[in-house]
Structures are given as C-alpha cells and as structure tokens.
Image (cartoon, coloured by chain):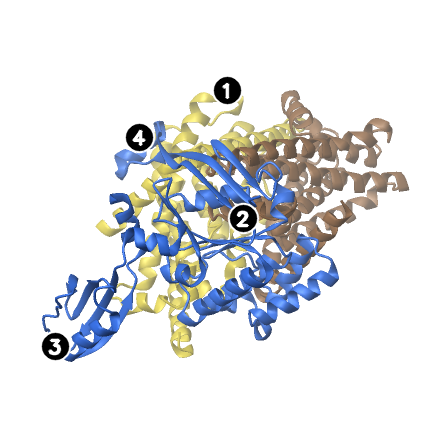
Amino acid sequence: MPQIVADDLAKAFRVAERSPGMLGALRGLVSRTHKVVDALAGVSFEISAGELVGYIGPNGAGKSTTIKILAGILVPDRGRVEVAGRVPWRERVAHVARIGVVFGQRTQLWWDLPVVESLDMLRHIYKVPAADFAKQRTELVELLDLGPLLDTPVRQLSLGQRMRADLAASLIHAPEILFLDEPTIGLDAVSKLAVRAFVKRLNRERGVTVILTTHDMDDIEALCERVIVIGGGKILSDGSLAELRKRVTRERWLTVDVEDGAEVSDPDATVLRREGNRVCLAFDPDVVAPAELIRRVTSAHAIRDLFVENPPIESIIARLYQS
Amino acid sequence: MRDAFALYIRYIAIATRAQLQYRAAFVLKVIGYLIATGVEFLGLWALFARFGSLDGWKLPEAALIYGVADVGFGLSDGLGRGLDRFSGLLKAGQFDRMLLRPRSTVLQLLGFDFRLLTIGRLLQGTAVLVWASRFVAWSPASIALLAESFACTCCLFIGIAVLQATSAFWTIESLEVWSAFTHGGNYASQYPMDIYARWFRAFFTALLPLALTSYTPACAILGRAPLDAWHALAPLAGPLFLAASLFIWRIGVRRHASTGS
Amino acid sequence: MNGYLAIVAARFRTLLQYRTAALAGLFTQLFFGFVRIAIFSAFYAASPSSQPMSLPEVVSYIWLGQATLLLVPWRIDEDVLQQIGDGSVVYELARPLDLYTVWFARSIAWRTAPVMLRMLPMFVIAMFVLPHDWALMPPSAAAFAAWLPCFAGAVLVSAALSSLMNVTLMWTLAGQGVPIIIGSLATVFGGLTIPLALFPAWSQPVLYAMPFAGMLDLPSRIFTGNLPPHDALYVIAHQLVWTLVLVAFGRWLLARGVRRIVVQGG
C-alpha cells in the first residue's frame, strides 16, 4: 500500500507578458497578453512509506509544482493524488499536520527570535503535547548539533546553521513525510555533509519518508536509492540511481589547473573545454580509472589544482532527452 | 477557539518584542504617529474655532464622535497590520509557508505582525475621549456601549483589511484603493454622520457600516438618542461585515490554490 | 542634465506599469476629496458669516491639495536608506559628483514623476467631470500663468525637504520616524487638513512663516485666485528662501554626517 500516489498529474499556468520600453509600458496600460505554460503534463509515481526518493530535473521541469501539489498548496488541473490516505488540498489542515517541508532558500523561522523560541512557537502552532515536544526537541538538538545555537537569533546564523535549525523546525511535530526542496543549496561542504548525514539517519532510524529535490548530484549519490527524473513536465526516468547511471552515462569529469599553458590531453579522455589555465576532461571510469588518469596527467604536466566530479544534472537530463 | 486566541496572544508577544528591540527608533515613530493622528483633531478643533458650531453640534460632542472613531480604528490598525502586509508576503512566497501550517491562514496573518505604533493613535484618541467625557453623563450601559463600539469598529476595519488582502490574490497592484476606505472611512467617521448628504450616509450605513459601529452608539452615549435595543445592536454590523469578508477570503485562497499565482 | 532626465523617464516608465495602482491612488484621493468637501460644506452651510475663503474657493483648494499631495515627503528614499545602512554610501563619496546634489536631483525626480502623473487626471476629473458645486474652478489665464513658477518652486522646496530627511538618516537609522513627523507637519501646516487661511487669525503669521505654506498652501491660493497673480512674486521668494535655507542646512548636516561616518570607520 503506497503512502504517496500521484496519477496523471497535469498543471498549466497563465503567465502575463510584458513588452519592454516606454511604448510597451503605455500599451500595457490598455491590454495584457498571456501565454500558457505546461508545468506538468501527465506525471505519475508511487512512493511507499520509509523511502528516500530523489526528485531531480532541470529548472522549470516541474519539480516545485509537483512538491506544491503533494504538499496541498496547489490544485492540479487533472489527475489524482493521495498522501497517507488523504487528498492534500481537500483536507489541508489535517494533511499539513502530518508533513514537514523545508525550502532551501526560505526559512520558516522567526528572523528576530532565538532558535529555541521559534521551535517553541511551532510547538504551539502544531499543538504538540508538552512531553512529546520535550523529547523531540532534545533529540533533534542533539542530532543536528543545535545546542550552542539555541539562544542565537536566526538572523545571526550562517546558512549552514540556519538549514540545520530549519530541519529541526520542520520535524517538531514528528511528521511521517518530509519534503526537502534544495536543502543543500549554497551550503559549505561541512554543512552539506551534516545535512546529508542527518537526513539519512532520519530515514533509516525513524522511517520518515523523504522526498528530496536537488541540483546537487552528490546529495543524490549520498542519500537516494531511488531517483525520479522529471523534464519538461514529464517523468523521464524512475528507478535506482545505478540504473539511471547505466542508462545514461558513466562519464565523469576531471578538471585541472595547469601551471604552464600546456596542452593537456589523454588518449582515454575527451577535452570538454579549455579556459586559460583550466582544462576539463571527460572520461569513462570503466575505461580508465580516475586514479590512473590523475596519475597520467600529473606526471605529464605541472598541476596546481584538480578535482573530479559527476557531470551536472543538466547534462544527464539532456542525454535522457536525446536517448 | 480559545486555543487560537492563546496562539494569537503569543504572536503579539513576539511582534512586540521584535519592535521594542529598536528602542530609539520606536519612540521616535510613536511620537511621529501621535503627531500625525493628532493633527486630524487639530483640524477639527480649528474648524470649530472658526465656525463655532456645526449643524447643531458643539465641539465637545464632536470630540466624542472623533475619539470613538479613532480608538476603534486605532485598535484595528494595530491588530490588522499583518493583513496590510499580505501582498508583500504573497510576492515573497511566504504565504505558502502559512498554508503548510495546520492553522487558519487569517489567524496566522493577523499574528504575522502587530503594529505597536498604533499606540500613537490610541493615545491621542483616548486623550480626546477623556476630555470630551467631562461633558457626558456616563452610566454602566453607556460604558458597555462604548466598549462594544470599539470592538465592532475594530471588526469592521479588520474586515476591510481582509478584503484588501483578498484582492491581492487577483492583483498585487490595486491596494491603495482600500486605504481610501480605511483611512478615508475613519476620517469621515471622525465627524458627525448627519452632516453628510443622504447618499453618503447610505454608503456608510449599508455598504461600510461605520455609521452603525461608531456614530450610532456615540449618539446614544451623548444622550442625543435613546440607549435602546437598536442602538445596542446596530454596532454588530461590524462583526457581520467581518464574517462576510472572511467568506470572500476563503474564495480567494481557493483561487490561489488553483492558479498558484 | 541628461542623466537627470533619464532618471525621471525611468521613473515614469516604472509608474506606468502599475496602471491599477495609479487608478487606485486616484480613487483614494477622489474619495478623500469628497469627504473633505462634505465636511466643509456642512460647516459653511451652518454659518452665514463671511470667511477669508469662500466655499467654492475652499472646494477648489481641496482638489489642488489632493492633486499636489505627493509633494509631501512621507517616505524616505529606500535606496538611500539601504546605502547608509550597509555603508556603501562611502562609495558615493568617493565619486567626483557632489553627494548632496545627487540626492537633491534624485529627490526632484522622485517628486516630479509621481506628482505629474497624479495631477493630470485629477485636474481633468475635478475640473470637467464633477458637478459644479464639487468642482475645481478653472483658473484665469493670469492665475494659471502665475501658478506655474510657484509649482516649480514647490517642487524645489519639497526636494530640499526630502534631501534633508535623507541626510538625517546618516545620524540615526532610527530616523525613520522623522519622515512621519515631517509628513504630518507638512500635511497640517501645508493646509491639507484645513486651508491655512481658516486657522485662527493669531496663528497666521506663524503658519505662513513655515516652509510648508510655500510648498502647498500658497501656490494653491494663487491658482484659485484667492491671492492675486502678482503675489506670486512673494510666493516664489518665500519658496526660494526656504529652499536655500534647507539646502544650506542639509549640506552642512551632510558634511558633519560624512565626517562622523568616516571617523567611525564606515
């Protein structure tokens, strides 16, 4: 019995168009034109309780629209949705009492208040019994290392600290499902690791269903066994990460900063781009192991810096389109 | 219901603390609002100084009308600030967060902000009332009527603020219209309603029942009219107006959920 | 000069986009105008004795007040507040342009565009659409000719006042209370609550000494003919004196403020 069911979701938006310049502004006084944008064009999936699902796609693909529909704040034009047996937008209050949502770029905490008071406010908003709240709070504070931050006003927190506080805030009422919308965006490396570790623990130890939208493939690698790819309002892929990889590309990228202006190349790698002293090579780790390629390049040239990464999500999606 | 009220008090406490953090700025602004609202009474006083009387109304009576109007409006001005800021919230996407909480959106909006500065208007309104009340024969009934008038006028203006917030679902831009009805309405109700033309009075009785929440009880308090059932019940037009506004608000929220604007 | 025109043009363009907001503002002012006229009509009807201003003059005066309402500096320049708040104002100081003049030019742009956009439809409606008893009386040719330079002078006083308020922000960000105070003083002492001429006789000398009289009240009286056209010379002199005083004070305060910021390490 799946916990979340989405069946043939469709949603279109009307967007007003504006002409530039003085003439356009005057014309705008008289008439306005609109164009229709299809955000979702038939999206279907099922998610069982306790899954940790990555929901990825390029900008404008329909991720936020899907999340809003599942959260109950947007009504689809067509299709069926059931979350924990409820239709989200029909039973808003009952539904949102059982879910948690974290938006990466917007905090739900009160700007001028110390973190602990924000959490307390949320307790009253969600009507959490005192004993439950005490237990939840202690656990969350420990897991997210919020102890030293509790008395700090939110406006004084760094981005990483704020995200940890937001995670705690979203879980005060012990929801069964957690939606994370770009939770690691803009965070430093240490904070990203902390967030990932926490989400993993939350899912493994408490069985909270997590749906994660992100642009960061490292998030996906670290957390998700299942990945749903959405592009242009349609599901392009739904399965394990390994399957996705295999289906699309095994490629990895090596970027090096050379000391001299040398021509860096390798028989097993393709040069993707060259910008001044920086060269980016694409290679297949099955053909040449990353360590081997690095060894070759560093022994042939004087290298100042290098890093290995996955191709960005956009290039993977682009390939999905092509295939 | 009691739980919602308790939550609202908590919201007010937060907003108050946040505003009091900037002590100097706050005091200066309160003085500013005291002056800004006080000059309205200055205008009324100057008119009476020049003309002596108005259509059978003397200054102390007019002052009571003014005080009743301003205290009622001042209460709503302070409590309804969150609604004023709704269009900004909507643009910034913060309304979504309110929809994600298992509480009434209006309650959350009212709690979102609380304009402590309204103390400026309340102080001058109360001062005028205190001065005017020397000329009034008070009784428990008329005091109760006064309190009822404050509450009902407050409801009415909050209802207008709710309509203003609702209009933001359709167009972010037309909000200044509503300030015509709030500030303009308050201004009109600072003077005795019977000096206005009939169509004007009709507007403020049937459409925006300020005459019923503010003027009618004031007349009864002054003894110009009997303190009968009509005068006691008329102010309830305020809460009725609020109820109607909340109904329209819900329509707006539903539309927002459909269009995602 | 081109730069200044560009700022004004940009402002016009931005304001034109918000057509509903413009209509809404117009509606609000019409509403307020009606309420005010109703109140004054009641007072005048109750008292037959003659007054320094006749009721038709008061009606016209009220509409003029509404039309030029946006000259009142209720709001501080948000950009300037931001600049002072995060300290980037020091970059402005490093530029070869004189900071006060830049702020003054901005204030003029900020006043002119909205005022004109509001004035035009208000004039048209108040003069030609409203019934006689409620209408703005068209001025005589002489009165109108006399009014134009007075309006320009009013813009200058308004800009000087705004610039001064911007400068006070350097002293205290808490100075957000200052515009409210100035705005309400300008409203009552500019004759927007009741015409200055109707205030008690003993207060007139004080009222007419203030800059607000020159900004709002006096030009309106020229327009309605309550003051003869040749009095425009007096009005303009009044405005220029106050502009110079406010500018001088503003510049002096700015210099002190700059020194203060520089000393504090920005």
Screen quadrant of the N terminus of chain A: top right
* Image point (9%, 70%), residue name: A263
Screen quadrant of the C terminus of chain A: top left
Q: State the residue in front, C123 or A171.
A: A171
What residue sits right under mark 2 in the picture?
Answer: A48
Task: For marks 1 and 4, give the one nearer the viewer.
Answer: 4
Supply the letter of whichever chain is brown.
B
* Image point (20%, 73%), residue name: A257
Whether residue A150 is visible here, answered yes or no, is no
Image mark 3: chain: A
| Direction from residue C66 to residue C240 in the image, left or right | left
Which secondary structure lies at badge 1? loop
**Distance from the alpha carbon under mark 2 to that under mark 1:** 71 Å
Do marks 1 and 4 share a subunit?
no
Supply the letter of whichever chain is yellow.
C
3 and 4 marks in contact (CB < 8 Å) = no
3 and 1 marks in contact (CB < 8 Å) = no
